[in-house]
Amino acid sequence: MSIRRRFGPAFLASLAWHIAIVAMLWLATRAATRPVRSATVLPDRTITHMVWLNDPGPGGGGGGGGNRMTDPPRRAELPGNDTITVRASRPRALDVSKPATHEQEPVQQLAIPVATLAAATESLPGAIEAPPGPPTLSQGPGRDGGAGTGTGPGDGPGRGPGLGPGRDGGTDGGGYRPGNGVTQPIEIRKGTPQYTADAMRARIQGSIIVECVVQTSGVCTNIHVTRSFDPAFGLDQEAIKAAGQWRFRPGTRGGEPVPVRVTMEIAFALR
């Protein structure tokens, strides 16, 4: 009672007011010391795509009635046989209970009479037969036993026992090869080759090989070029002319003069 009397109501109001201010300050300080939480930023998930749904609408009208008549049959459905229709054939049932047997047909034996005929010359139909000539050893149209068209026992168109168109046993157009008792012809005179005007201007030089048959008279026959170096300027012909001017002592066989085939070299040189 003594306190109320001493201070009065004003003191009590002031005290309450100060207590309220202290409480407010304490609450403000406590709120300021709380940790501040960071705000979480959420992504913008605004829907930008629009989907339209087909809602069922009102029903449509019904179709009109027909005349109730049947359609005519199509051409492909008409009854009848088709031109390209192949009838299916039923396969025959095979009887596998019995094995198939193949009987061989008997071979007919031909009875051909065999008669022995006398040996004779077979004549061709339409051929004109010549009268038989005197009996010789010839196997051809030649004479004296020759088998060719020549005379003598030659085997060609020559004379003598030659195998070719030569004479006295010569072969290949006449003339022996040196050797086996055949001597080489001996050179007596040479022929000089002449240059042609074109070859002279071109200044061509070289040798041409020719082959010929040296007859028993020493003259060269059957001359031909075996190796040429100038087929364009006419030197081959000049070489053949020069070879025809050569003279030889003929080769011999058994001491008798015989044709012998020789090879010559015709040289062309500018001086």
Image: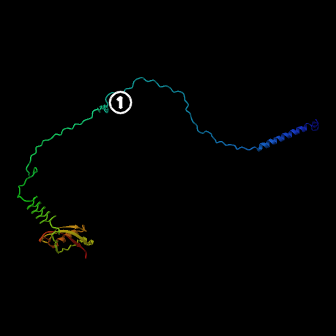
Q: Residue at x 89, y 37 (%)?
A: 12
Tell me where residue 227 sits by quadrant.
bottom left
Against 144, residue 15 (above or below) is above
Is residue 36 depicted above or below 145 in this figure?
Answer: above
- Residue 31's x, y, as percent? 77, 42
Residue 166 in the image: x percent, y percent? 13, 65
Q: Is residue 19 above or below residue 89?
A: below
- Above-or-below relation of 35 to 232: above
Q: Position of residue 91 (x, y in %)?
A: 30, 32
Position of 76 with respect to 109 (left or right) is right
Q: Nearer the viewer, residue 48 or 160?
A: 160
Total number of numbered discs in the rendering: 1
Which quarter of the rendered picture does the N terminus lie within?
top right
Crowding around mark 1 (Cα neighbors within 10 Å: few <14, some 14 to 19, many 20+) is: few
Residue at the spot of label 1: 76
Q: Quadrant of the C terminus?
A: bottom left
The residue located at (82%, 40%) in the rendering is 23
Q: Is residue 173 visible?
A: no
Closer to us: 9 or 271: 9
Outermost residue on the top side: it is 68
Q: Is residue 39 left or right of residue 21?
A: left
Residue displayed at 81% across by 42% down: 26
Q: Is disc 1 placed on a helix, strand or loop?
A: helix
Picture quarter containing residue 51?
A: top right
Q: Quadrant of residue 140?
A: bottom left
Residue 169, image x, y percentages: 13, 65
Q: Name the amino acid, label 1.
A: Ala
Q: How is the image coloured?
A: rainbow
- Residue 12 visible from this viewpoint: yes
Identify the residue at image location x=23%, y=73%.
267
